[in-house]
Image (cartoon, grey):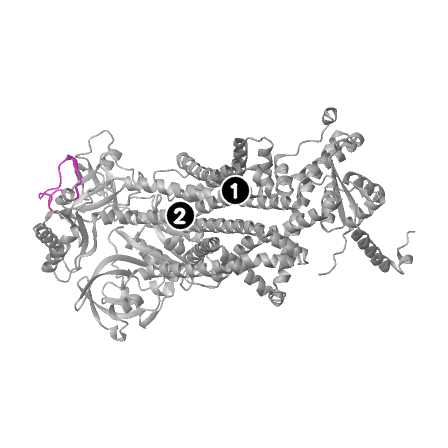
């Protein structure tokens, strides 16, 4: 069975979680993504992809039922697994390989 | 807390979206998604305003439903693909594939009852579906087995809602126009049917004979297997009497004798020469034994109407254009015959020949196909249901295999081996049943169903067979497989989550998985009830209608009554016919044990031979308008007493009603009430048959008799209302039904009646023999057969659905024993537990039934034409069926619910 590659949104979400200190929840992740990419990100999409990543073993989660916290919100916190780091590295390697030698062509003016 | 609860909240999603969420997300995820979207909504409200935030929220709710659905689909496809890889022939038997099969076999044999039940349900449902599909395909889909089937049409007389035969005058006018090339037709042929007696040496029998114009066979493209068919000249009045045998009759009566050509046969007393044998028989010819040439004389009046016209459209011609042309021909023809036919409203119509041949069975067949596919769907979901339960019992084994490194595909294969084995066994049984059923129907022949002899296993039938079996396999195997592998995923997550999750999701992996299985199984129950209820209601309506039909008073006393038909030779002159009938009636009446003998032209309750239009002298229809029509038959004076038909007013027929006496008629009560409501109908006079000239006969009503059905028991009020009787002696004919009232068993008298007839003329057979109760029975046969078929399907569907509900309930109680035990241990009331379990079991039943009622209402149009005396939306039948089905479902839930309420918490906790 070929090793599954990461989709763009999957990759972005994993990176956002790492940027947020290795553990975060969906609303915060959406904010982070929107800030960093400058585009609107659908929270519904993030909701689904987070759970898909968990099924693939790239994330683990814990549920905070909001009791005794300031927000009182039910939140599921996701954190990345070693497998996620491995996949991200592989993905980065592959991209750099493809970028190699194209700096002149694609560099920003 | 309470202050926080009252903070502004995002808008409530619509009902549809809520439903979509329920269908795609489990409860825990729904909770999380609601909380997350609310949290995302808040800063947007502060930043962009309420409206923009609400808009965003609605978009996210919708998108989430769509994405969750896609995600589910994606997962299902991934599992199926993984299983597919494992099931490739090259790998099917590698890695212990055979072992899987053996394991499956052993497992299935360990629960023989369930296995046999599954195979039997699947087999029966598949077999019935296949047979019905083959039937629908052969009868309704395949073109008629003629040369240019799509261009063949029937031309008829369109009078109000009736489609009646045409006359010689009609045929000749239409043929002339067609031959002149003025129409969209390339050709036309006429046929007529008449009873006939064949005498060939020792053999004396009634045969089914069809008279055809010589153009008939070439038009259809039917050829001779031996000898030749009719030439054009042989349709002239002066040409010799010739006969062509059907292939079947040639085999049956002559043993396929090659020397039959040139032989002489006596048909109705006239000698005919055999000139040929037809090669094959299409659905029109297979109902006949012999074909003679229709030798038409130029007409002297517009009637009588007895011809069926078959027209072949030109290539690319439109049937609508043809209809317009026919109407135009009728308009031009009308003035020519106006003196003998006044009805300007009657015109010509045309329909595809397929409609003529199979039109009457189209609706019932379509209904049956729908019903049987419903049953198949229920059977497959029931099997899936049972197999899901089985997968669950095996979950420990599957967990262990997964822990030891079995891939998803491998596990899928393991589960699929079960359903595969069952589905294959079911398919084999189904194929056997289908073959048997099709053979049975084919041998029953055209009397059961038009085109029955064309039934077979052509390419499309095999394709659908394979498709149905694959679909059944997918449903019976696919769902349990997704459950098994999906359950595994949950279990894995549960296993990893225990390490990291403080608090967790509140559900262990196993109970999440079984909750998923519960949801799937309850959804299956919902589908079953949604499908079973319309079936049950359909059967209920048919039963209701049948019971009413059975209670219909046929109008005559059917006990101890013997009847038969007799057809005299063509050579008999009118006075010879009259003498023969007189002698026959007299001698039959002298047979010991015979109480009465009557002769009539038609036989109740469903063998009307004639109807006729008439014009009342005291309230004439304006010239050119359609005249009223009534069932019309000649009868002897004793006919009424023999059949027990009461004389209500006036006088009966008597010996004075002879040919030279003034023409008189008896009418039935319906006729009198329809045309003379509240008045005395006796003494009223009318002319008949469209003949309005002063010199045409004038009939006088002399008496009123009780109502008798001649056009089927289901005939209600309508255009064809009322019956007119003319005296047998004033209406000479070579064809009569003989009715004999006996003291005892009517069939005990039959040999004596036959002997009497033989004494009079040994070449005249007694045909269509039937007792009075057989006549009633025959009139009920079609609705009864339909009721049995649909009723059988409905009962099967109901039983399977109830079984499904019961299975789900037992499973649920088993799975929830621990939870129930804890509830009870914490002081929960057994009665509450009982109610909770019952409510849980009945929720899908009630929702499914609601959908079922809606479906039944929507489908009511399909069955309406098959009903008598009850509407297709009869509230009583609907209510009765719902109560019956839901009541049975409640009963099937009671025992598991009671068992749940009796759970002993101590024993449960000890088990833990």
- Front position in the image: B698 or B763: B763
Which of disc 2 and disc 1 is earlier in sequence? 2
**Residue extending farthest bottom:** B259
Q: Secondary structure at mark 2?
A: helix
Residue A6: image x %, image y %?
Answer: 77, 53
Q: What's the mark number on residue B790? A: 2
Residue B232: image x %, image y %?
Answer: 31, 66
Classify residue B53 as left or right of residue B15: right
Report the chain holding disc 2. B
Q: Is residue B658 magenta?
A: yes
Mark 2 neighbour class, 10 Å CA radius: few under 14, some 14 to 19, many 20 or more? many
Q: Which residues are magenta?
A: B643-662
Q: Secondary structure at mark 1?
A: helix
In percent of the image, x 36 and y 48: which residue is there? B788
The answer to whether residue B379 of the structure is visible from this angle is yes
Q: Is residue B679 magenta?
A: no
- Front position in the image: B146 or B776: B776
Query: Image height check: is B758 above or below A31?
Result: below
Query: Image height check: is B527 above or below B749?
Result: above
Report the chain holding disc 1. B
Residue B353: image x %, image y %?
Answer: 39, 56
Mark 1 or mark 2, whichever is nearer to me: 1
Q: Is disc 2 on the same chain as disc 1?
A: yes
Q: What's the mark number on residue B809? A: 1
């Amino acid at each position: 069975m070929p090793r599954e590659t990461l989709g763009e949104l999957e990759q972005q979400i994993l990176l956002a979680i790492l940027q947020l200190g290795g553990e975060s929840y969906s609303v915060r992740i959406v904010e982070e993504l929107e800030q960093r990419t400058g585009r609107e990100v659908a929270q519904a999409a993030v909701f689904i992809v987070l759970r898909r990543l968990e099924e693939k073993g790239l994330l683990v989660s814990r549920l905070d039922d909001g009791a005794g916290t300031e927000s009182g919100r039910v939140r599921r916190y996701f954190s990345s697994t070693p497998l996620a780091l491995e996949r991200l590295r592989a993905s980065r390697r592959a991209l750099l390989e493809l970028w190699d030698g194209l700096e002149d062509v694609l560099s920003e003016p | 807390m309470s202050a926080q609860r009252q903070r502004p909240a995002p808008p409530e999603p619509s009902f549809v979206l809520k439903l979509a969420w329920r269908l795609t997300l489990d409860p825990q995820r729904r909770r999380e998604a609601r909380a997350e979207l609310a949290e995302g909504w808040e800063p947007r409200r502060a930043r962009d305003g309420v409206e923009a935030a609400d808009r965003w929220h609605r978009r996210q709710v919708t998108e989430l439903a769509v994405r969750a659905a896609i995600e589910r689909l994606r997962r299902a496809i991934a599992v199926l693909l993984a299983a597919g890889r494992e099931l490739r022939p090259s790998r099917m038997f590698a890695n212990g594939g055979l072992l899987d099969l053996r394991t499956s076999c052993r497992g299935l044999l360990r629960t023989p009852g369930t296995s046999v039940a599954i195979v039997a349900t699947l087999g029966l449902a598949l077999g019935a579906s296949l047979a019905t599909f083959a039937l629908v395909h052969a009868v309704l889909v395949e073109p008629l087995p003629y040369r240019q089937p799509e261009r063949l049409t029937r031309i008829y007389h369109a009078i109000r809602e009736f489609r009646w035969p045409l006359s010689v005058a009609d045929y000749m006018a239409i043929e002339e126009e067609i031959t002149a090339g003025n129409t969209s037709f390339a050709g036309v042929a006429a046929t007529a049917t008449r009873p006939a007696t064949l005498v060939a040496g020792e053999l004396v029998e009634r045969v089914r004979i069809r008279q055809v114009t010589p153009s008939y066979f070439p038009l259809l493209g039917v050829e001779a297997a031996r000898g030749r068919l009719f030439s054009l000249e042989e349709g002239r009045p002066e040409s010799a009497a010739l006969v062509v045998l059907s292939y079947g009759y040639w085999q049956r009566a002559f043993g396929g004798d090659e020397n039959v050509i040139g032989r002489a046969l006596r048909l109705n007393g006239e000698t005919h020469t055999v000139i040929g044998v037809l090669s094959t028989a299409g659905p029109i010819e297979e109902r006949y034994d012999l074909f003679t040439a229709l030798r038409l004389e130029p007409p002297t009046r517009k009637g009588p109407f007895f011809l069926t016209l078959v027209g072949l459209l030109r290539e690319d011609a439109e049937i609508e254009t043809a209809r317009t042309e026919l109407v135009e021909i009728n308009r031009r023809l009308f003035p020519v015959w106006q003196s003998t036919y006044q009805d300007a409203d009657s015109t010509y119509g045309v329909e595809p020949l397929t409609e003529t041949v199979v039109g009457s069975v189209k609706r019932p067949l379509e209904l049956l196909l729908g019903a049987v596919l419903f049953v198949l769907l229920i059977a497959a979901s029931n099997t899936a249901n049972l197999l899901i339960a089985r997968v669950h019992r095996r979950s420990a084994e599957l967990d262990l295999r997964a822990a030891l490194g079995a891939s998803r595909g491998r596990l899928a294969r393991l589960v699929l081996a079960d359903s595969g084995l069952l589905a294959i066994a079911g398919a084999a049984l189904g194929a056997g049943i289908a073959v048997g059923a099709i053979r049975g129907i084919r041998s029953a022949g055209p009397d059961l169903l038009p085109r029955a002899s064309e039934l077979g296993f052509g390419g499309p039938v095999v394709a659908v067979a394979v498709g149905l079996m694959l679909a059944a396999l997918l449903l019976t195997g696919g769902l349990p497989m997704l459950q098994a592998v999906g359950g595994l995923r949950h279990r894995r997550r549960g296993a990893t989550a225990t390490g990291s999750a403080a608090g967790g999701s509140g559900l262990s992996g196993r109970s999440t998985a079984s909750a998923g299985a519960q949801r799937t199984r309850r959804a299956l129950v919902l589908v079953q009830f949604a499908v079973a209820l319309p079936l049950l209601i359909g059967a209920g309506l048919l039963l209701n209608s049948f019971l009413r039909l059975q209670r219909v008073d046929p109008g005559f006393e059917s006990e101890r009554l013997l009847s038969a038909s007799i057809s005299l030779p063509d050579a008999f002159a009118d006075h010879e016919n009259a003498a023969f009938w007189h002698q026959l009636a007299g001698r039959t009446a002298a047979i010991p044990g015979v109480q009465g003998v009557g002769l009539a032209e038609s036989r109740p309750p469903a063998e009307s031979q004639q109807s006729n239009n008439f014009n009342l002298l005291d309230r004439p229809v304006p010239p050119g308008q359609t005249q009223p029509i009534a069932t019309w038959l000649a009868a002897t004076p004793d006919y009424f007493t023999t059949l027990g038909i009461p004389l209500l007013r006036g006088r009966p027929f008597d010996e004075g009603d002879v040919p030279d006496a003034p023409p008189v008629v008896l009418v039935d009560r319906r006729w009198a009430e329809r045309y003379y409501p509240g008045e005395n109908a006796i003494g009223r006079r009318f002319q008949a048959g469209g003949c309005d000239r002063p010199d045409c006969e004038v009939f006088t009503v002399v008496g009123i008799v009780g109502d008798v059905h001649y056009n089927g028991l289901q005939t209600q009020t309508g255009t064809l209302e009322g019956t007119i009787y003319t005296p047998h002696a004033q209406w000479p004919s070579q064809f009569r039904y003989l009715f004999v009232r006996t003291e005892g068993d009517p069939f005990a008298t039959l040999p004596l009646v036959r002997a009497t007839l033989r004494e009079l003329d040994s070449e005249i057979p007694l045909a269509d023999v039937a007792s009075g109760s057989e006549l009633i029975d025959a009139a009920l046969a079609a609705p009864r057969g339909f009721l049995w078929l649909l009723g059988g399907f409905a009962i099967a569907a109901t039983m399977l659905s109830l079984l499904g509900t019961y299975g789900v309930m037992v499973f649920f109680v088993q799975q929830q024993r621990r939870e129930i035990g804890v509830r009870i241990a914490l002081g929960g009331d057994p009665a509450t537990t009982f109610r909770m379990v019952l409510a849980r079991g009945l929720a899908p039943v009630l929702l499914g039934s609601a959908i079922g009622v809606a479906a039944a209402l929507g489908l009511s149009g399909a069955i309406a034409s098959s009903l008598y005396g009850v509407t297709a939306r009869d509230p009583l039948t609907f209510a009765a069926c719902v109560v019956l089905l839901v009541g049975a479902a409640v009963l099937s839930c009671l025992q598991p619910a009671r068992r749940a309420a009796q759970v002993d918490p101590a024993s449960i906790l000890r088990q833990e």
